[in-house]
């Protein structure tokens, strides 16, 4: 494995880094608060699981007609996305509990959803959270080849129309994840900064067992037990996936592909301009921080700045540490990107897609 040489400069931003770390640590210490999951987080975990598998279980009762079953399939997709946001994401970051076995167990919720927690840990935790928005390294900027999500990616003629097909592309995200993405990345010779990555035996077992488990409960079991035709099953299956996909795709895009964020390029020596924490603030945006219901459902991922600075802090605390991060950032002249509302962030995302799809001779590294 030969990592690409991309390093972060410290510079004058060291004062911001030291103060924001200290202020957040003081918040937890002075309040006698654990930075891991609390009772509210555990209750949410239980509710999300009950909702998801309750909707799924109702499909087998025979109490509902075709249209109601279609609605239940879509609600299962809503819950599916919620499990990824609220349980798996925190657990795989090691943010849910101080006990590693608890994080590993809850992280396996990704396997239930058809995703590999091992590959997510490698690509998301290891690559995306290190080289955020760095084209050619950050794999999260390669959601699909039909979308251009960075000014440093090659532009094709059809990108001019990408605002029209962005949502359909996002809707296929979980289908691609379940049937292609994990395999593609697992067997890839080049993955972000890695070359010739060798996976341990437990990763092979986890990938194969996880996929079999997922295909079993989402395809084999309903196809055998539900009293529906094959084409009704296909419609319901797609409805579940497309619902989950569009929710997951949109939420993750609103943090890194909006007008305020930057897309830094390493210099000739492979160095980025800022310290790592400052790089995260330049490349990441919060949105709808006052929307408590949205924040509850998306696992605090509307507080994406706080998540990127403190990924091992449980998402249930983000709304409390957010004012601290913003205050320290503004004190030191560090950007703090924020869209006050969900629809404001969504509009900014689509304006950014439109900008990135335009045919221009030369684009700056920081479109805004």
Image (spheres, helix red, strand yellow):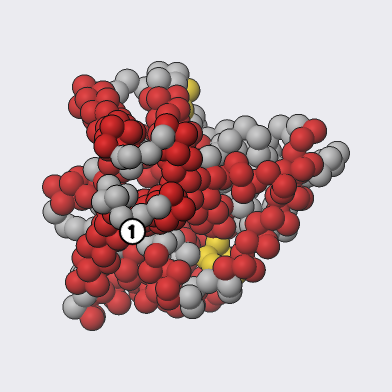
Depth check: give the residue in front, 282 or 149.
149
Depth check: give the residue in front, 263 or 170.
170
Q: Residue at x 72, y 48 (%)?
A: 163
The crowd level at tag 1 (other Cα within 10 Å; few <14, some 14-19, many 20+) is many
Q: Is residue 345 above or below residue 139?
A: below
Left or right of 78: which side holds 9?
A: right
The residue that label 1 is drawn on is 86
Q: Is residue 74 above or below residue 6?
A: below
Left or right of 339: which side holds 107?
A: left
Left or right of 95: which side holds 143?
A: right
Q: Secondary structure at mark 1?
A: helix
| Residue at the limit of the structure toward the bottom, as seen here | 31
Q: Residue at x 45, y 39 (%)?
A: 232
> Quadrant of residue 134 in the image?
top right
Q: Residue at x 49, y 78 (%)?
A: 290
Which quadrant: the N terminus?
Answer: top left
Q: Is residue 363 visible to us here?
A: yes
Left or right of 213: which side holds 114?
A: right
| Residue 235 rendering spot, x and y as whole percentages | 48, 40
């Amino acid at each position: 494995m030969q990592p690409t040489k991309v390093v972060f400069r410290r510079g004058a931003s060291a004062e911001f880094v030291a103060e924001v770390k200290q202020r957040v640590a003081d918040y937890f210490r002075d309040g006698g608060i654990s930075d891991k999951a609390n009772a509210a987080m555990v209750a949410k975990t239980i509710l999300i699981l009950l909702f998801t598998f309750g909707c799924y279980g109702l499909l087998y009762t025979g109490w509902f007609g075709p249209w109601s079953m279609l609605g239940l399939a879509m609600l299962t997709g809503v819950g599916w996305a919620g499990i990824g946001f609220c349980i798996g994401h925190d657990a795989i970051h090691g943010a849910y509990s101080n006990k590693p076995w608890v994080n590993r167990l809850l992280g396996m919720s990704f396997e239930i959803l058809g995703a590999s927690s091992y590959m997510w840990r490698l690509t998301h935790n290891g690559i995306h959270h290190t080289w955020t928005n760095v084209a050619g390294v950050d794999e999260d900027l390669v959601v699909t080849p039909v979308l251009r999500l960075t000014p440093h990616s090659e532009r094709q003629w059809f990108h001019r129309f990408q605002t029209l097909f962005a949502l359909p592309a996002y809707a296929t995200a979980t289908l691609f994840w379940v049937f292609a993405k994990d395999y593609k990345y697992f067997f890839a010779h080049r993955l972000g900064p890695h070359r010739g990555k060798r996976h341990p035996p437990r990763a092979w077992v986890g990938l194969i067992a996880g996929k079999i488990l997922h295909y079993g409960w989402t395809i084999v079991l309903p196809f055998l037990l539900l009293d529906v035709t094959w084409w009704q099953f296909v419609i319901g299956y797609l409805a579940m996936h497309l619902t989950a996909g569009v929710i997951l795709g949109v939420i993750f895009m609103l943090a890194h592909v909006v007008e305020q964020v930057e897309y830094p390029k390493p210099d000739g020596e492979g160095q980025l301009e800022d310290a790592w924490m400052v790089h995260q603030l330049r490349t990441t945006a919060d949105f709808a921080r006052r929307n408590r219901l949205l924040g509850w459902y998306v696992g605090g991922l509307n507080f994406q700045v706080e998540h990127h600075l403190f990924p091992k802090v449980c998402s249930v605390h983000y709304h409390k540490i957010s004012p601290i991060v913003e205050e320290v950032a503004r004190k030191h002249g560090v950007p703090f990107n924020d869209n006050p509302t969900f629809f404001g962030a969504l509009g900014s995302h689509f304006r950014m897609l439109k900008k990135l799809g335009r045919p221009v001779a030369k684009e700056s590294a920081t479109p805004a």
